[in-house]
Structures are given as C-alpha cells and as structure tokens.
Amino acid sequence: MFVDRQSAGKQLGHALTPRRFNNPVVLALPRGGVPVAYEVAKILQAPLDVLVVRKIGAPINPEFAIGAIGENNALVVNQLVRRQLGVSDTELERLIARAQVDLDRRISRYRHGKPLINLAGHDVILVDDGMATGSTAAVAVTTLRAMNPDRIVVAVPTASEEAVDYLEGLAEEVISLETPINSGSVGQRYERFNEISDEEVENYLNPEFTGRFVNGNKAAIDQEIEIPLTHGASLSGNLSLPQGCMGLVVFAHGSGSSRLSERNIAVAKALQRDGFGTLLFDLLTEQEAQDRRNVFDIELLAQRLITARDWLRNQETTRNLALGYFGASTGAAAALVAAANDHTIAAIVSRGGRPDLAGLSLQLVKAPTLLIVGGRDHEVLELNRYAKKHLLCRSDLQIISGATHLFEEPGTLSDVAKIASQWFRKYLASSQIVSHRSA
C-alpha cells in the first residue's frame, strides 16, 4: 500500500538507482503516471517527458481498460477481456473513436507542438502509477519500438501478476514494487489516489515551472571558463550544462560579435531549457578582434573551434558529451570547416550563416547540417542554396518566413531556436556518447 503517487515515485526511483541504464530517459504515461515519473526522473537525474497513450475503457466501467491507443496509430486490444465483456466490433469502434478524440487533445495540450525526446541510443524507463491489465503499457511499448530505443524498461509501483506476465513478453524488463495476486483497481493500492488534472501534468512538464528535465531545469553547471591558447593568451567563455544534459552545443559567432551576442544567448537559453549544454566563447582575443581581417579569417576561426573541442574533451564534466556546432554569419563557415572530416561532431546548425565561405570543406562535412535563413534575407538565402547543393552529408534548408538577416522580427528568433532544438534532438541527442582525449 502506498500513501500517494509522490511517495510511490520516490520508492520506485530508489529501487531503480542500483541498476545500470544507458543514457536513461523517463517517460510518463499521463495523467496518473506523471507525478510518479517526476520523482523517478529527479532521483535518477534523467530527462522527463510523456508518452501519450489513452486507454479504451470498458462500456460499463471506463476506468477498466480493454485496450489502448497511442501515438503513431498504435493500437492494442485485449481480446480475452473483450470477449469476457461481450464488446462487439461496432461497440469497439465507437470506444476507439472516443479515445482517439481525447488522445489528440492531450498530445496538443501536453506537447504544444514539440516533438518527443529522440529516444535512439537511450534506455527508456516507462512509468505509470500502476497496471491492472497492462493494456495501456502494452500499447506504449508498441509505440516506443518504432523509435529505436536501446531498451524499454516498464517500471510501476504496483501491478497485477497478469499485467506483469503480459508485459514481460513485450519489454526488456518489467519492474513492480509489489505484485498482488488480485490487485483489483490500481487506486485500491493507494491511501490517496486523487484525480490528476491536465493543469497538473502541464506543471510537471513546463520548463518555466519545474522543467522538462529534473531539478527545475536549473543548470548543473553555469560558469565562466578560459580556454588557453598556445601563445599564452586565452579565450573567455560561458559553459552551461543542465541536469540530464543530452549533448553540448558549441556556438560560433560571426561578423565581429562575441560570446555576449544577444541573439546567440537567446538561442542558447532555449537549448538549455530543452536539455542541451551550451558553450559560448570568444573566437578571437581582444587584440585579434581589433584587426577586422580576422573576423573573416575562416581558417583561424575554425582552428579556434577545434581548440575549444579539444579543451572540452579534456574536461571531466564534458569529455563524454556528444558535440554539435551552432554557427552564425562567418561562424557558420568556421563550424563547417572545423567539422570537415571530424566524426566526433554530431550535428551542425547555421543561423543566417555564410556556409558558402567554407569552400571545398563543404564536401567533407559528415555531420547532419541544418541551414536556417530568413525569407527576406535574399542574398544570403541564395548563398545557402548554393552551399546546400555542395554538402554531401544529410542536410536541410529551413526558411523563416518574414525574417531578415538578423531575425529581429517578432517571433522569428524563437522559431530559429525551436527548429535548431529539433535538429539537435534528432541528431545530437541520439548520437553515441564518445570519449576522446586530445593527443
């Protein structure tokens, strides 16, 4: 018997702590599973998200699942339970249609257009407040299989033996703190089992309230750093690593701006909220920046990115993080040159960049590259189209309608951040964790 979902989540989290997981991601089954999963994610220091699944309730008792539907058109029906309750094909179709309406509403409300965390290369811990029949969790596992996680572990405070047996044939592991022979409804195993509202779910997931990632999205590391150069000088920077960091994005500014670029800082903060670490640093020393020619010295800027990469690989807190580049203006060309033939760079994003200045290096880039350009930045748009034709790696060109070169129009920079985050989530977060030391 559990007091409430929060206490059950803490017990479950502590039970999971001794186990070894590969880049764990905690996924909650809303609504009741969200408070439990939040406590688990906090204890494991893992990212938290939801997988939206809706039970197909029995005609007489809607809380009793005869099946479930999920994202990507997943469907599971417990045919034995269905026959026992005498649910006809026509009645089943009506119940599925009613569940689909609520599923679509929840996806819209909980996600706000954001995609699910990229699960490739991660162990997924699927959490609910309990399982009676296992149908809801079964459709969740079916949905997750298409997303290529390393392993799927179903973890709940309480479950019936029937549900555990059912899920053991679908998931790599099923963990339940208690398994009553006749569990009845899940709510009977809790002293307090209140209804969870959509507002409460949103509060658990809202980065502005508690954070999509644990510890209220407060950065685990947020510090000023100095990257030494061979001639005794150094480059100043700011390193931020949120809890559950999914990868590290190194910013390459251009056109003479610095680590204090307001636009790059805005994008960096958005990426941090989505679980990515960021490094903003000066590519030039104060003396070098006084010579305008250095701003357009792509080889010099690229070498500074390589120096930053090597420095990060020698730091305890960052050496095992997958790396990506975010370049603006000439910094985008520098990022592409630095990434040429570098298999340790997992993804690149260019904002209003000059990738054409990368020259022959374009054909040597291996990392998936996204080019973002304002729709009203006509000259730069054509230069990006030229560059995309010469990129041999996976690439895409995204045009922000109504935006000019500096993305000063309302909402356009937010669009840049959103698209960049999606790209990094797809290619950086899913990249294998690497461990390198510079020679």
Image: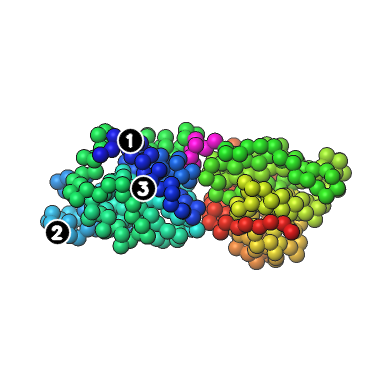
Q: CA distance from mark 1 to mark 3?
A: 18 Å
**Res 79 quadrant in image:** bottom left
Q: CA distance from mark 3 to mark 2?
A: 28 Å
Residue 226 is one of the magenta-drawn residues: no
Q: Which is nearer the N-term, disc 1 or disc 3?
A: 3
Q: CA distance from mark 1 to mark 2?
A: 32 Å
- The residue at which mark 2 appears reads as 83
Give the magenta part as a residue range. Answer: 211-218
State the image coordinates of residue 34 (x, y, percent, origin top left).
Answer: 37, 41
Pick the quarter of the image with the N terminus: top left
- The residue at which mark 1 appears reads as 197
- The residue at which mark 3 appears reads as 127
Give me the residue at 30% from left, 62% from top. Answer: 169
Q: Say if 344 sits above or below 15 in the image.
A: below
Camera-side mark, 1 or 3: 3
Magenta highlight: main SS? loop
- Type of amino acid at the residue the image marks with label 3: Val
How many neighbours does mark 3 have within 10 angstroms: few (below 14), some (14-19), or many (20 or more)? many
Is 198 left or right of 393, judged from the image as shown?
left
Is 193 left or right of 20, judged from the image as shown?
left
Q: Say if 153 sits above or below 271 in the image.
A: below
